[in-house]
Image (spheres, rainbow, N blue to C red):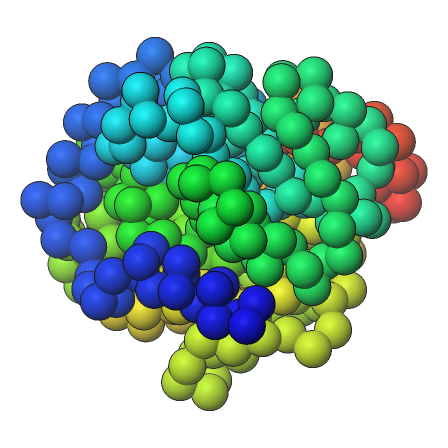
Amino acid sequence: LGWVVVMAHLQALWGSLELCTLEEVLAAATRVWGSEHVVRTPAVRGLVDFCPGVDVVLKLENMQTTGSFKIRGMVNKILQGDQQVLRETGIVTFSAGNAGRAVAYLGQALTVPTKIFMPQTVPEDRVALLKGMGAVVEQVPSEKLLESAAHCIDSEGRMLIHPFDDVDIIRGHASCGLEILEDVPDVDVVVVCCGGGGLLAGVAAAVKLKKGAQTQVIGVEPTGACSMHLSFEKGEHSWCEKLDTICHGLAPPFAGKATYNHAKAFVDQIVLVTDDEVRVAVKRLYESGLVVEASGAAAVAAVMAGKCGDLDGKKVVCTVSGRNISCSDLNSILQTVVS
């Protein structure tokens, strides 16, 4: 019965699994850009010279509100709801990190009651942070996160804010892709980190709908959490049987159904990076003045490690998707990598 409830709510998020249209992407971007809770992040070139012969531009979503790109999709989703109803019934999500942080922030800013289901394994300081934003946090086994959120909707009437697998979330994240095209109109390749696939799906949709096949979009996953890569191989959205990576923000156990459909339509390829390659990228970015979490450095890692094919003479944009890393984790990476 639990999964019947879950699937009913997910089907509502997926709709008919239609792909985003350019008109929908532009409408979502107008909503996102009109919100005081989202900033237009810079696209900076020349900050890190790690790939000779390649013009690399960094899209710094680590400078976004709440420290990651997640706020874009959440704003697009939540602002479409009836705000008075949401203030009475509330919203709910499930997350181990950045999605929960974005939802908690918006709940506090919009005075909307917020409940977040988190895995029992998350550090206590992460739980305390969300509680400090006014969210009610319940910790459950990882395999019960989605089911717990679905039952909460049925019992409390809250709106479900899925961390990634929702067409409204994808449309909101597409605003990042539109900004890339405005700031770097002659971009040849866009490299995007991928976990559940929300950012990749949105950026790819924006790029392909605006530019067509002339600009390549590459998704990047860690080898220890490669559900989208497996989905591409199998031809359907798939699960990872085992997760083992320092890129915790890129490690949901499954690729989204809506996100996979968009990736299949708009993404040219998915490449994989090792944790060691990510560590090197985090350190290189830190030495250039940027604090970036492991998940946020995956796209840079792929370019540095030569995973994206021949980029010589090309203009490449890498998303730097988040900064939320603890001092201890950052120090561990910096001490591990040998210069």
Residue sitting nearer the eye, 258 or 173 = 258
- Residue at 18% x, 43% y is 25
Left or right: 226 as drawn, with respect to 331 = left
Q: How many marks?
A: 0
Left or right: 212 as drawn, with respect to 98 = left
Residue 78: percent from left, percent from top:
35, 31
Residue 225: percent from left, percent from top:
65, 66
Residue sitting nearer the eye, 103 or 297 = 103
Q: Compared with residue 186, is residue 230 higher up or lower down, i.e. above or below?
A: below
Residue 166: percent from left, percent from top:
36, 53
Quadrant (top left/top right/bottom left/bottom right) for the N terminus: bottom right
Q: Compared with residue 19, is residue 173 higher up or lower down, i.e. above or below?
A: above
- Residue at 14% x, 37% y is 26
Q: Can residue 321 be seen from the camera position used here?
A: no
Q: Compared with residue 234, is residue 246 higher up or lower down, i.e. above or below?
A: above
- Residue at 58% x, 34% y is 115
Residue 183: percent from left, percent from top:
26, 29
Q: Can residue 326 be seen from the camera position used here?
A: yes
- Residue at 71% x, 39% y is 138
View extreme (left): residue: 23
